[in-house]
Image (cartoon, rainbow, N blue to C red):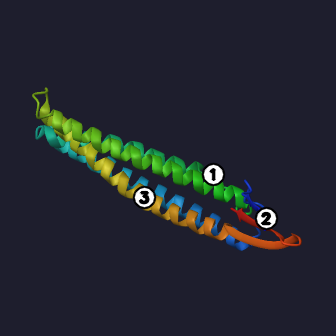
Amino acid sequence: MLLGIATAIPARAQGVPLESAQVEAWALAQRTSQRAHLWRVSAWGLANAVGGLALWAGTRNGSEVWRGYGLQSSLWGVINLGIGTAGLLGGSYPDPADLGAVLAAERSYHDIVLLNMGLNVGYMAVGTALVAAAHYGVRNASTWRGHGAAVIVQGVGLFVLDGVTLLRSRGRLGDMLDALTSVAIQASPVAPDVWTVGVALTF
């Protein structure tokens, strides 16, 4: 018996027959989740901008630790608020009728958030280094500790926000791939005692 195995993996998802309503549901979930994340980042930024400025202004003649913490937090807050606002006002989303575009957009978004998770870990490392350096005789050690503590808090906060978003994106991506992946095994005789077996993976 001669056994032949053929495996085909189409590069495009457009060829997979799916109900348009399902594709539109994925696109809507994607857009809703992304906008919710931007709203959370904006709220986090606003809280840090306002709270940090208030702390910085209220400690003019007080602790340098809290003054440095307030200044650093307010700067991060303004940046995050700007990023969130820009995303909400100028975000672009794939055509909900284009299966390939929806899948590609989800994959891209997942990778971007994953990259941000790595950056957040880097922020925490930098903040820890600043706090540690304050114990080695640097000038304005109290200010270093304040700035370092604020960077750590920002890293942790953004790590949590991005982590929630990453898990949701991964869930949607998994649902898409589960629905798009199909395995078809066909066996048919091409000659007496000779059979071919084809395996097709489509996603």
User: Which quadrant of the view contains residue 107?
Assistant: bottom right
Q: Nearer the viewer, residue 24 or 189?
A: 189
Residue drawn at 70 percent across, 69 percent down: 183
Q: Which residue is mark 3?
A: 40
The image shows residue 93, relative to residue 27, as above or below, that is: above
Residue drawn at 46 percent across, 62 percent down: 167
* Distance between mark 2 and mark 1 Cα atoms: 53 Å
**Amino acid type, callout 3:** Arg
Residue drawn at 42 percent across, 61 percent down: 164
Residue 182 in percent (x, y) is at 69, 69
Mark 2: which secondary structure?
A: loop
- Looking at the image, residue 76 sits to the left or right of residue 66; the answer is right
Residue 73 in view in this figure: no
Mark 2: give few (<14), some (14-19) or many (20+) Cα within 10 Å. few
* Distance between mark 2 and mark 3 Cα atoms: 60 Å
Residue 130 in percent (x, y) is at 21, 36
Q: Which residue is mark 2?
A: 2
Q: Nearer the viewer, residue 98 or 36?
A: 98
**Amino acid type, callout 1:** Ser
Q: Earlier in the sequence, mark 2 or mark 3?
A: 2
Mark 3: give few (<14), some (14-19) or many (20+) Cα within 10 Å. some
- Looking at the image, residue 189 sits to the left or right of residue 79; the answer is right
Q: Which quadrant: the C terminus?
A: bottom right
Q: Of the numbered discs in the image, which one, if any, rests on residue 92? A: 1
